[in-house]
Image (cartoon, helix red, strand yellow):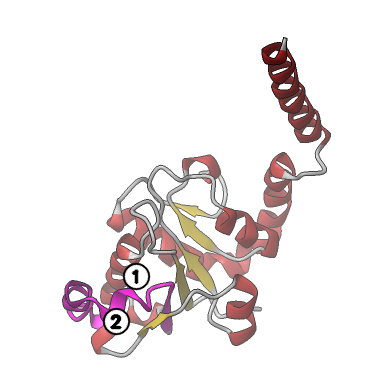
Amino acid sequence: HTNTKNISIMESNLYIVKTCFIPMLIAEKLYNTNPDLVDNVYNVGSHRLKEKKNFLRFCNKFDLVKDKKMSFEGRWALNFLLDKGFAGTILSHQWCNELNYLQLEAMYLNLPFVHNSPTFKEHGYYYPEFNVDIGADALKEAITEHPKRYLEDRKKNEELMWRYNPNNKKNVDGYIELMEQVISTVDTEKE
């Protein structure tokens, strides 16, 4: 029941591994080719960047900014964004940080999410590495197709989420095994 044309870029922008630059380029590319598919882009976690001259110079070249379709927000939790209607489609990018809670949250809530995480390649709407063109195609697919396919995605997402669930016996057993290894190492060092 979300407006998939409201796009949220939810990057921390604290480290190079999770920044808003590639998602911004993806959203801009889609907007330039299909402006009717973008209502708003909420660039969450970018409020500190907008104080930087180079970032402003970069942003001011975007039609999304010129047309007042992109806003620069503080860091908000996903449930807040959903409550405010900001999070229709999640658009993300990572570099060497492919196991991200955001994708799992989006899967749990059955939201469309566009991402480049090879770990979740079969889930959501995937684009490889830094590929803006394929990313824009994936964003278009998420906006137009997710309302038709979200029920079939739910089962597939639930299966993947179980793999990371703390109640999954395999995870519990693996954690116990790791703890036993640490304890035995400590015991051996004491002798």
Element carrying mark 1:
helix
Q: What residue is disc 1 on? A: 27
Query: Going from the N terminus, do you reach mark 2 or mark 1 first?
Result: 1
Gap in angstroms between the C-alphas marked 2 and 1: 8 Å
User: In this orientation, does residue 2 appear?
Assistant: no
Amino acid on which disc 2 is placed: Leu
Q: Residue at x 29, y 57 (%)?
A: 132
Amino acid on which disc 1 is placed: Ala
Farthest-out residue, front? 191
Q: Residue 54 colored magenta?
A: yes
- Residue 88, given in percent of the width and then of the height, sits at 55, 75
- Locate residue 127 relative to residue 84 in the image: left or right: left
Q: What residue is disc 2 on? A: 64
Residue closer to the observer: 167 or 147: 167
**Relative to residue 27, is residue 35 depicted above or below?**
below
Q: Quadrant of residue 162?
A: top right
- Residue 17, given in percent of the width and then of the height, sits at 38, 51
Q: Residue at x 29, y 72 (%)?
A: 28
Residue closer to the observer: 24 or 101: 101
Q: Residue at x 35, y 86 (%)?
A: 69
User: In this orientation, does residue 97 appear?
Assistant: yes
Question: Badge 2: how crowded within 10 Å, few (<14), some, or many (20+)?
Answer: many
**What span is colored magenta in the figure?**
40-63
Question: Badge 1: how crowded within 10 Å, few (<14), some, or many (20+)?
Answer: many
- Locate residue 63 relative to residue 15 in the image: left or right: left
Asked if the residue under mark 1 is in contact with the one under mark 2, i.e. CB atoms within 8 Å, the reply is yes
Residue closer to the observer: 15 or 63: 15
Element carrying mark 2:
helix
Marking on residue 171? none
